[in-house]
């Protein structure tokens, strides 16, 4: 699953990158440790204007019929293999898909001495997670689509966010709800990702800052994994 990630690009950077209009009212701030229920930047299509917009949405999809926003805590991820058949996720897959901009995401691996955190990122630039969004009386909310981990990423966790290469952004946002949209990214694209061991501070959701994503210098951190 994806339960923690970093997103630090500014609203100006994201609106320029995704050719979107800004709806965040300059309230978007860097977050190196974004956790479920936190406000997350998403790029979606405003159907009334037929335009891409950059919005803030609560992470953890809250269905329109929900009476409690805490319902979203169980909906932070949507499995690519089953979302089209889900009562919760299928309506959003049909017409409310979004891009969740990210710098990278975190996972933890159990070791003999405890748990080691890893940060998966693209050193050449940011990432675009496939996402779904909806609106309810609690506002906008979103979920991140996950798929089976591929290549070296499978040695860290058996799931990973569904990563969208730039040529797929338009189809994901506005194309038909084709199951082909849920195909995993190409191996060549994934080979450019860095799997970086990082310190334990990221395990506390109250911690934030660029130091959370810095590579650990100890040479034995990856022993037994890589």
Image (spheres, rainbow, N blue to C red):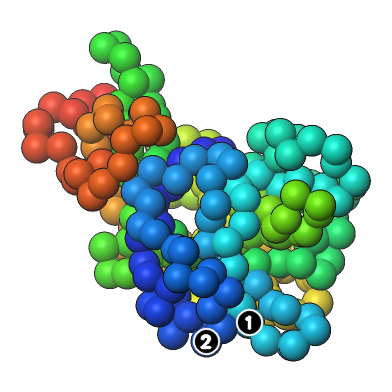
Q: Position of residue 15 (x, y in %)?
A: 48, 80
Q: Residues within 10 Å of mark 1 (few under 14, many from 20)?
A: many
Tell me: residue 209, above or below residue 95: above
Return the residue nearer the eye: 107 or 47: 47
Q: Which comes sooner in the sequence, label 2 or label 1?
A: 2
Q: CA distance from mark 2 to mark 1?
A: 7 Å
Q: Quadrant of residue 203?
A: top left
- Give the residue at the far top of this rendering: 112
Q: Is residue 173 left or right of residue 121?
A: right
Q: How many marks on residues?
A: 2
Indicate the position of residue 19 as horizontal and vertical percent values: 52, 87
Q: Is residue 136 above or below residue 36?
A: below
Residue 147 shows in this picture: no
- State if disc 1 and disc 2 touch (CB < 8 Å): yes
Helix, strand or loop under label 2: loop
From the image, tell me which residue sits under label 2: 19
**In the picture shown, does residue 111 fall above or below 212?**
above
Q: Is residue 21 visible?
A: yes
Q: Could you tell me residue 129's position as x and y percent?
A: 54, 60
Residue shown at 53% from the left, 69% from the top:
24
User: In this orientation, which residue lies closer to the viewer: 111 or 16?
Assistant: 16
Residue density around tag 2, few if under 14, some if 14–19, many if 20 or more, within 10 Å: some
Q: Which residue is mark 1?
A: 52
Residue toward you, 78 or 71: 71
Give the number of the disc on residue 79: none
Element at badge 1? strand
Residue in the picture at 71% in, 48% down: 61
Residue depicted at x 58% and y 74%: 23
């Amino acid at each position: 699953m994806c339960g923690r990630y970093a997103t630090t690009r500014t609203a100006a950077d994201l609106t320029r990158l995704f050719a979107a209009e800004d709806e965040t009212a300059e309230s978007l701030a860097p977050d190196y440790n974004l956790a479920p229920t936190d406000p997350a930047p998403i790029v979606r299509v405003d159907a009334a204007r037929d335009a891409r917009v950059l919005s803030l949405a609560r992470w953890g999809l809250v269905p329109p019929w929900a009476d409690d926003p805490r319902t979203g805590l169980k909906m932070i991820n949507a499995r690519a293999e089953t979302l089209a058949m889900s009562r919760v996720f299928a309506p959003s897959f049909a017409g409310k898909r979004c891009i969740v901009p990210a710098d990278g995401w975190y996972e933890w691996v159990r070791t003999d001495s405890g748990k080691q955190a890893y940060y998966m990122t693209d050193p050449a630039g940011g990432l675009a997670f496939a996402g779904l969004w909806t609106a309810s009386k609690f506002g906008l909310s979103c979920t991140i689509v996950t798929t089976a981990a591929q290549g070296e990423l499978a040695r860290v966790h058996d799931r990973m966010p569904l990563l969208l290469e730039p040529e797929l952004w338009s189809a994901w946002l506005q194309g038909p709800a084709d199951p082909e949209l849920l195909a995993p990214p190409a191996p060549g694209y994934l080979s450019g990702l860095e799997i970086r061991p990082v310190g334990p501070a990221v395990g506390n959701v109250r911690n934030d800052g660029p130091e959370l994503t810095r590579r650990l210098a100890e040479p034995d951190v990856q022993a037994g994994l890589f």
